[in-house]
Image: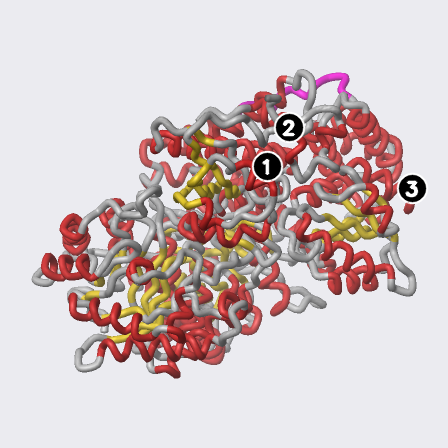
Amino acid sequence: MFQPDQLLFLDGGMGTMLQKSGLKPGELPELLALTNPELLTAVHRQYVEAGADVVNANTFGANRRKLAKLGVTVEEVVTAAIAAAQKACEGTSARVALDVGPLGELLEPLGTLDFASAVAQFAEQVRAGVKAGADLIAIETMTDLQEARAALIAAKENSDLPVLVTMSFDENGRTFTGCTPAAMAATLTGLGADAIGVNCSLGPAQLLGVLRELCASTSLPVVAKPNAGLPDPVSGCYDVGPADFAEAMAEAVAAGVSVVGGCCGTTPDYIRALHARVRSMTPGKREPNCSSLVCTATRTARISGVRVIGERINPTGKKRFQQALLAGDLDYIAEVAIQQEEAGADILDVNVGYPGVDEAAMLPLVVKKLQEVTALPLQLDSTNPAALEAGLRVYCGKAAVNSVNGDAKVLASLLPIVKKYGAAVVGLTLDESGLPATAQQRVDIARRILDACLAHGIPREDLWIDCLTLTVSAQQEQAEATLEAVRRVTQELKLRTVLGVSNISFGLPNRLLVAQTFLVRALSAGLTLPIINPNQKEMMDAVAAFRVLSGEDAGCRDYVERFANAAPAAPAATGMTLDDAIIRGLKADAARLARETLTSCSGLTLVEQHLIPALDKVGADYEAGRAFLPQLLSAAQAAQAVFAVIQDSMGSADAVRKEKVIIATVKGDIHDIGKNIVKTVMANYGYDMIDLGRDVPPETVVAAAVQHNVRLVGLSALMTTTLPAMEETVRALQQLPQPPEIMLGGAVVTKDYADRLNAHYAKDAKASVEIARKLLG
Amino acid sequence: MALDISEALRYLGVTGVPDDNLSVQLTGLARELEERITPRFRWTLANVSDLALPGQTAARMLADCRQAAVLVCTLGAAFDLWMRREQQRDMTRAALLDALGSVYVEAACDVAEREILVRFPGMYLTDRFSPGYGDLPLTVQPALMALAGAGHIGVTLTDSLLMNPQKSVTALIGIAEKPQPARIRGCRFCAMKDHCQYRKGGTTCHVST
């Protein structure tokens, strides 16, 4: 149906036409399918007569969330709306699209709607559309890449129809959530869309830049369905007329756009003018750059030079990480990610495989957490198909998978998953017969993996080959074999290569020197994706130097900046005590002084004699109005750095941690900064904070209170509309056989309110600490 | 749009002369905020009689007005994503950013208000007021947002009537033929008056009128 070199005409605005016919703003237009289908048919018919090859049925908002309030089902509305459109197309070659718009509720992490529920809602709409006989599916007006993904996955899983996906972009060339055209193109192309593009938000002239970028980023047909300019707030009229609209669209067609129509403010006159203006044109020739890349919604890592993959999110040999995984401590894993990002990693490898950890449950949780804290693309590191599928499903963007190998069974089980989610994949050059001994064997296996990928429809640029680093002290001749294989895979197979570098030096003194030398040799042989510890400055220095020599770092700018900014560490302030450093919120000094102090006393003594008194001093100043929230938080963060030092020195901070406290923002409430402030401050008084997040149903709070057997639960609510949920949660907790103490906080909570519920009133973070001390010690 | 740092300090509960470090941090962060985030707004004109707003507050505010502008303004989802990231990285910076975000969205409403005024030469605007002020209930949110076209700038409403993205505002601004007294900027009209942190601290959040 879609050919990049053949024009296809879509229809124009429906809402605008319905409002002209008397629909009031705020009224749900989807209901017209049941109450006035003739009106819909008449509008569709006008578009068909104006030249539209496809009309969008009036199903944009026909999802369960919107319709449930009106007492009609998705199937009723979709069936009637498609029938009304079909009637308008009778006797013509025009086709009917099931129109799918946003759900009207934000997905995690922006909102609280989880990905699976979003897919389920879209799936219901898609199934109804298929049953009613839609010819294609048009997913429209998306601003969140994750919601577009949910709709597209639902469409692909529940139909064989062609799917067109358009998103709405702003003047700055991004969607409201910051999604770039390149990220949209990579992600939706990978997921199997049949055409992608833009609709709504602006007029055609303002969207030209985004359209050009899309044309350069995908080989799929590109769709343009802009508004008739911008509406005037007073008159409601749009400011671009049919002729100007058509003229600007002609420019888009010349740039390579092949699917054209209009959105808000456009009418059959616009489509007629558009048709007349461009129908004899051939869409401009495009030369999309389809080279290898991975991305998130806001950040793209194109593998056009050296891209460092950070290796630290991996439990192997890391006791602290193992403990965090077993305890479900995602905050720690997030910290490891942030450190690597700050050290200059381009992509993060994510491995959560460890005995006692349910990888299929853990991987998606970690992916979600990491995507909340970093914009870096991720490489999911597992051989467990269920874990990979679960992780890729919730990953927003285009991920990489690490890894498959030459074993036919492995390829058969993992490649379909890689293909379905449009990921890049690492192919290890080993197979069921074990490790290869020569470069030739490695190249042969790489070729086999490439053939399997191509057979599964995975493009060659999405395959990265790992030629395997072996320990040079054990198998010395293998280092050369690896490098030779890197060279040949790069040159002969034209594939990107990945290499875990650190292994090379195992068992040798001055490991870093051997690893650094090997890294430079491998990069010279053609390696583009070294997997290293980016926190090792020497390794990143080598990458920076290599980028200069290869010409990737044009004008040596990054290199100069890297070393210009590497100012000598500020001389340690003399005479500063640990207590001072905490009080003044100086993280680095606090950590350094804590390390010094720990040489002469235990972690517990440090906490009792320095950390808590220092925090108390800040707390007292806060009470007295001499210090304010920013200082309270800075001190808490310095204390956090001290805790991290203690934890590293003891392998665990259990000995200095006080008991667990649960904290949550109640159901229906999404404002959680206050709760997070309380969490930060209390954690640094030593409480083991279990944060249940926001929009937390009463039963979840109760279950957690029982599971962790806590004596104190903190709840927050910001709006009067969510106070009933707070009350319900308090009552449910108080019905437990051993009810915990409860403290309440948030803008609308008062002491009277808390008293009435037999709960403690926490007016701020400091007060929460005092309540906990009084009740728990 | 230069952000008013003193407003942000007020949201943070900082009284007296702030230490230099805090002022420097806020100034730098304000600049970063303006670079990274572009506030968006949309407004439309409505007949007051069509709005059918319940309660005394709306009646008093719009007493002299046949028409009112319905405004929706937001910092957008990108700000919320940034906030979530910052809360994981540096809670102090997150708290400062949260305060600056509140200042920023109000400043953007001011810009919108000036734009509205320009469209009605010779007319006068009432104070801006929002659902939740006085006795104007949050239940009018869905209708106001639909009117202003909130969806077009990415603003949604949860089932519990909370706006998402979080730094979003809906407001009504009456258009009158005679000068309008400052009615709203006072505790008397505020739904928070019984448990307001500023009042407890002996101050107010409004410029006295």
State the scheme by which the image is colored. secondary structure
**Between residues A609 and A565, which one lies in front from this camera angle?**
A609
**Quarter of the figure with residue A628:** top right
- What residue is at 64 percent from the left and 30 percent from the top? B11
Where is residue A329 shown, x and y percent of the image?
Answer: 70, 54
Q: As drawn, which residue projects farthest toward the left?
A: A280
Is A776 on the left-hand or right-hand side of B173?
right
Gap in Å between the C-alphas at discs 2 and 1? 17 Å
Given the image, on which type of amino acid does mark 1 rest? Asp
Number of the front mark, 2 or 1:
2
Q: Which residue is mark 2?
A: B205
Given the image, on which type of amino acid does mark 2 rest? Cys
Label 3: which secondary element:
helix
Q: Are marks 3 and 2 in contact (CB under 8 Å)?
A: no
Gap in Å between the C-alphas at discs 3 and 2? 33 Å
Please say whether residue A209 is one of the residues in the magenta stretch.
no
Where is residue B113 shown, x and y percent of the image?
Answer: 43, 32
Residues in magenta, as a range:
A565-576
Q: Chain of mark 3?
A: A
Q: Which residue is mark 3?
A: A774
